[in-house]
Amino acid sequence: MTYALRPTSDAPERPELTAGLTARAAIEDLRRRLVRYAVKLLWNRDDAEEVTQEAFGIAIEHGVTHAESRFGPWMFRTVGNLCLNRRRKRKHEPLDKWIEHAGEDDPVEKAAQLERLTMLREAIEKLPDQQRIAIVLKTQQQMDYGDMAHIMEISESAARGHVHQARRKLAELMPQE
């Protein structure tokens, strides 16, 4: 099932009012969060930036503005849809340049970390679309289940179910150390 670009009407309050930010700062904060979300779905920073920009263009075309309460969930849903479409067309970017090494000089440890991340990426790629989106929203964006339900246009219990199923599947796919 893919998610429609249909905005929800019962989304949380305007982000700039709830976070105490100016409208410009709230949009920039949302843009950064959307790019991080897209990177986790696409595994390519340039594509993530393009998808996020495209989502803002679609929002303008559809007349969805930051002043509306539905803007944040609508943007996450739109970016998610665009990422799923783009994933079918592009190849992945190598992970080695994105790894942050915490003072490690041991090449064996660096190689092991790269291998673990590559296996995790491959395991996430094997998840169904709904589970992949749910696990990224929960673990990377640290969203609560209510916000996830708004973005995915499903019930809160269904969002919980997708995260649970994704975690179980990842545990099966990842080798135990």
Image (cartoon, rainbow, N blue to C red):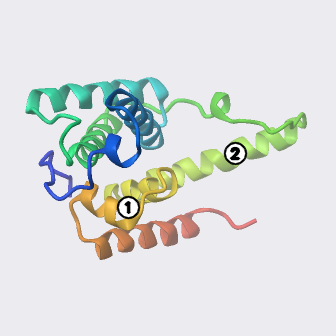
Q: Nearer the viewer, residue 3 or 150?
A: 150
Mark 2, residues whose alpha carbon is within 10 Å: few (<14), some, or many (≥20)?
A: some
User: Which residue is farthest left?
Assistant: 62
Q: Amino acid at mark 2?
A: Glu
Residue 18: image location, x then y, percent: 36, 49
> Residue 166, percent across and down?
45, 66
Helix, strand or loop for disc 1: helix
Asked whether 9 or 168 is in front, the reply is 9
Residue 122 horizontal/vertical position (percent):
53, 49
Q: Residues within 10 Å of mark 1 (few under 14, many from 20)?
A: many
Q: Residue at x 22, y 55 (%)?
A: 11
Q: Nearer the viewer, residue 29 or 76?
A: 29
Above or below, comparing residue 160 to residue 170 in the picture: below
Residue topped by disc 2? 115
Determine whether 63 is above or below 76 in the image: above
Q: Disc 2 vs disc 1: Cβ atoms closer than 8 Å?
A: no
89 relative to 124, above or below: above
The residue positioned 32% from the left and 44% from the top of the image is 17
Tell me the residue at 18%/34% (across/down).
65
Q: Label 1, on which residue?
A: 131
| Residue 124 horizontal/vertical position (percent) | 48, 54
Marks 2 and 1, the one that precedes in the sequence: 2
Query: Marks 2 and 1, how far apart in space?
Result: 23 Å
State the residue at coordinates (20%, 58%).
1
> How many numbered discs sit on the rendered protein?
2
Residue 175, relative to residue 2: is it above or below?
Answer: below
Residue at disc 2, secondary structure: helix
Quadrant where the C terminus lies?
bottom right
Hey, what amino acid is under mark 1? Gln
Marks 2, 1: nearer the viewer: 1
- Which of the 4 image quarters holds residue 41? top left
